[in-house]
């Protein structure tokens, strides 16, 4: 089904994710968080596009590649610091993913395409970038939202949900509404969508 270079690249990406020192419980088993996250990304990709290209599958799997090595608090804890951190991470993660693809036998063009997707270039104009954005938003809503919302006031959460929703495609919206959420999380989503 997949090429040997794809299998090699996925293995190298997963080996990098497995080094994440942040361990979570997943179905009663300890798992490095970024390995859990990348598998959840791949899970949602299957729901959105079961026929996705190897290139998109690699970008999805590498989206947070070695992210834990650059913690959020290594930048100023304000909006400007957040944007600087995100910009740096996009480039770094794209460079790491590109190199893994080159080392796995992909052409320069394909490897750089993976990097471009990881950086989410041409969102809204590029169908694969849009799928990656949908997947990232779905994983946020499914895995991170309920914990995230506890640390912020309601107005900020509703604003974040509006921005998240605005980045997603119609198919992404459909899948988002199927996610099992707490009553409080559903209430916040409803408020965000009502405005």
Image: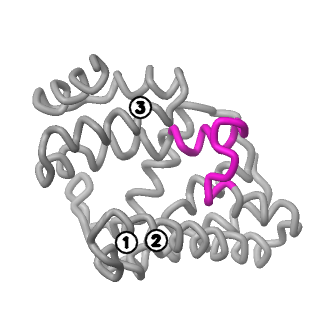
Which segment is the magenta one?
117-134
- From the viewer's perspective, is residue 124 above or below residue 71? above
Numbered label attached to residue 84: 2
Query: Relative to residue 114, is residue 44 depicted above or below?
Result: above
Q: Are marks 1 and 2 in contact (CB under 8 Å)?
A: yes
Q: Label 1, label 2: how many angstroms apart (C-alpha)?
A: 5 Å
Q: Classify mark 1: helix, strand or loop.
A: helix
- Residue 125 pos. (x, y %): 71, 37
Indicate yes or no whether the magenta region holds residue 22.
no
Q: Quadrant of the C terminus?
A: top left
**Circles 3 and 1: CB atoms closer than 8 Å:** no
State whether residue 8 is above or below residue 154: below
Q: What secondary structure is found at the residue carrying circle 3?
A: helix
> Residue at 37% of width from left, 71% of height from top?
81
The residue under label 3 is: 165
Real-space CA distance between mark 3 and mark 1, rounded to the nearest whole angstrom: 23 Å
Which residue shows up at 51% across the image and 76% down it? 16
């Amino acid at each position: 089904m997949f090429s040997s270079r794809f299998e090699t690249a996925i293995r190298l990406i997963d080996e990098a994710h497995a080094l994440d020192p942040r361990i979570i419980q997943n179905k009663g088993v300890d798992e490095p968080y970024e390995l859990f996250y990348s598998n959840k990304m791949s899970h949602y990709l299957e729901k959105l596009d079961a026929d996705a290209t190897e290139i998109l599958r690699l970008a999805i799997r590498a989206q947070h590649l070695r992210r834990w090595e650059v913690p959020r608090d290594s930048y100023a804890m304000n909006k400007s610091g957040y944007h600087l951190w995100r910009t740096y991470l996009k480039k770094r993660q794209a460079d790491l993913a590109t190199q893994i693809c080159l080392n796995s036998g992909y052409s320069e063009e394909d490897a750089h395409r993976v990097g471009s997707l990881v950086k989410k270039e041409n969102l809204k104009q590029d169908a694969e970038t849009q799928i990656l954005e949908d997947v990232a938003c779905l994983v946020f809503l499914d895995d991170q939202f309920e914990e995230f919302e506890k640390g912020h006031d309601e107005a900020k959460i509703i604003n974040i949900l509006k921005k998240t929703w605005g980045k997603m495609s119609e198919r992404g919206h459909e899948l988002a509404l199927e996610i099992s959420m707490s009553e409080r999380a559903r209430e916040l989503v409803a408020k965000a969508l009502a405005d």
